[in-house]
Amino acid sequence: MDKISGTEDAWDTRQIGADEEYVARVAPNLEQQIDESLGLQMISIRLDRTLIEAFKAIGKFHGIGYQPLMRDVLKRFAERELLGIVQGLVAGQNPDDEPGAPVPPPPAAKRVRKDAAPRAGGRKPQGVKKAA
């Protein structure tokens, strides 16, 4: 089959192939099969508008939709956190430790305490109130 000259860019710019009259939604059972085959589950979540706008801007820059981008970011975060937890558990294993004893979080997961000491220059970490 021969290509029609000049159409490759037209597809990319959505000059052709994006008319609603040629679009049809797949049957609900097929949509469910696709989601199941990809291991996807629909959820509902409330997020700050500014966060959504940031993801839209980042997605536009990278040429990807903001929802797949969010899914990728959440997946990478969860994988990294789980790896850190497992590494912390393995590093913290000691025969003298009680089973179920808390293990300190890995460096990437540490949070700023409210009573944290000031940084160099006298500035406290962001979100920290001055001690009474």
Image: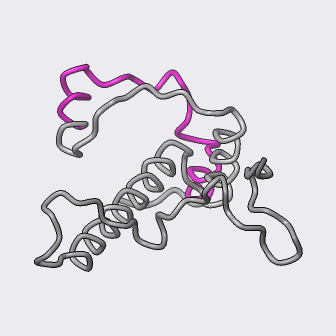
Q: Quadrant of the N terminus?
A: bottom left
Could you tell me which residue is drawn at 23 percent across and 60 percent down?
101
Q: Position of residue 82 (x, y in %)?
A: 30, 62
Q: Residue furthest front?
A: 132
Q: Position of residue 115 (x, y in %)?
A: 67, 56
Could you tell me which residue is drawn at 47 percent across and 64 percent down?
109
Could you tell me which residue is drawn at 24 percent across and 70 percent down?
89
Residue 15 part of the magenta segment: yes
In this image, 99 relative to 42: left or right?
left
Query: In the image shown, does 13 or 118 lie closer to the viewer?
Result: 118
Is residue 23 placed above or below 8 in the rendered structure?
above
Query: In the image shown, does 25 or 14 lie closer to the viewer?
Result: 25
Residue 89 part of the magenta segment: no
Colouring convention used in this rendered image of the protein:
one colour
Is residue 31 placed above or below 117 in the rendered structure?
above
Tag count? 0
Q: Position of residue 132 (x, y in %)?
A: 78, 47
Could you tell me which residue is drawn at 17 percent across and 78 percent down?
94
Q: Position of residue 103 (x, y in %)?
A: 30, 65
Query: In the image shown, does 98 or 68 lie closer to the viewer?
Result: 98
Is residue 92 placed above or below 114 in the rendered structure?
below
In this picture, which residue range is highlighted in magenta? 7-34
In this image, 69 relative to 75: left or right?
right
> Residue 24: which quarter of the image?
top left
Query: In the image shown, does 41 or 60 lie closer to the viewer?
Result: 41
> Residue 84: which quarter of the image?
bottom left
Is residue 16 placed above or below 58 in the rendered structure?
above
